[in-house]
Image (cartoon, coloured by chain):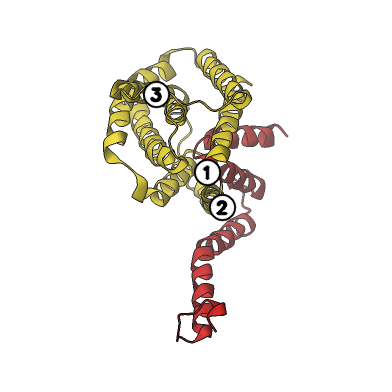
Chain colours: A red, B yellow
Amino acid sequence: MSWLGGEPGGHPLSAVSSQQAQAFRAAAPALILSVAAVGCAVLTPHRGNPGPAVMEAVATASLISSIAGFAFSAICGAMLFHLCVD
Amino acid sequence: MIACSIADQATMVWALRREVEGRSLGLFLLGGAAGLPAGVWALLHADHGLYTRALGAVLLAYGTYMLACRPRVLGWRHPGFDLAAGFLGGITGGAAGFPGAPVTIWCGLKGWHKTRQRALFQPFILLMQVAALFAISAMRPRLSHVAGFDPADLLCLPAGLLGTWLGIACFRTISNRQFALAVNILLIVSGLSYVM
């Protein structure tokens, strides 16, 4: 049953569950941050707090800038400027 | 935005912590520390609009040129060039909040692997940003009209960190060629944001 990727002689399902656990560990930060981001955007729409559009701009700028590792301020600043103008 | 930027940079440095070469970084930081006061002085006393437009035009021209031509590698390996790149990074960091431009360009011209490049310029950017904040607060006169830090801005942090997490995941999957492309596109975007 080594086609499941398990250790020779080991239980095949243990390999599957270990892969699932690994995938979950890798995705856990994203899940936690997603919940926190949505929570901040939805649950705190008070006066003066940054709105969902601002958070969206910050998330987009962070995503784009962290592919190469710089230019967050340039991208985020431009997006926030357009948000303020609109 | 500064809080988000520093949090993003810190996350990226943490993700690359095993690849950071302290000795190479030290040389760039030394140059950066020398250039930073000049940059902050320019921020406080020079025509901000003029030099940011000039910086934007340089970034725009360089990024466009590098997109149009084949990637090139310079054979110059003298530590003085690293020091000079760090010095320029200190000036642009203090004056325009963009310490990464000269160092990023220089690391790209060295033909390094994408991870090695980022392991150098990522901590450089983070440390220069933090140092610039301290230098600005130390060198500027007390201005009552300058807006202070609003704790509500921290509500943007989870969104920023989520974007950073996804961006780092993208970075790990792209090739060196695609990384160079991303760097040049971001240089153009940065240049446009300063010019416009």
Label 3: few (<14), some (14–19) or many (≥20) C-alpha neighbours in 10 Å: few
Q: Residue B30 location, x and y as percent?
A: 28, 28
Q: Can you tell which mark lies on residue B21?
A: none
Q: Amino acid at mark 1?
A: Ser
The one of A3 and B95 positioned closer to us in this rendering: A3
The one of A40 and B55 positioned closer to us in this rendering: B55
Residues at circles 3 and 1 in contact by the CB criterion of under 8 Å: no
Q: Left or right: where does residue B162 sit relative to residue B131? A: right
Q: Disc 1 and disc 2: Cα gap in Å? A: 8 Å
Residue B73 lies, with reference to residue A11, above or below; the image says above
Residue name at image x 63 percent, y 36 percent: A80
What is the secondary structure assignment of the residue under circle 1?
A: helix
Choose top left, top right, bottom left or bottom right for residue A33.
bottom right
Residues at circles 1 and 2 in contact by the CB criterion of under 8 Å: yes
Identify the chain of the residue marked 1, using the numbered disc in the image: A
Q: Amino acid at mark 2?
A: Leu
Task: From the image, state whether disc 2 or disc 3 is nearer to you.
Answer: 3
Residue name at image x 50 percent, y 64 percent: A26
The one of B100 and A75 positioned closer to us in this rendering: B100
Q: Disc 2 and disc 3: Cα gap in Å? A: 34 Å
Label 2: few (<14), some (14–19) or many (≥20) C-alpha neighbours in 10 Å: some
Looking at the picture, do discs 1 and 2 lie on one chain? no
Q: Which residue is mark 1?
A: A66
What is the secondary structure assignment of the residue under circle 3?
A: loop
Q: Amino acid at mark 3?
A: Gly
Q: Which residue is mark 3?
A: B75
Residue name at image x 45 percent, y 36 percent: B148
Identify the chain of the residue marked 2, using the numbered disc in the image: B
Q: Can you tell which mark lies on residue B166?
A: 2
Residue A31 lies, with reference to residue B140, above or below; the image says below
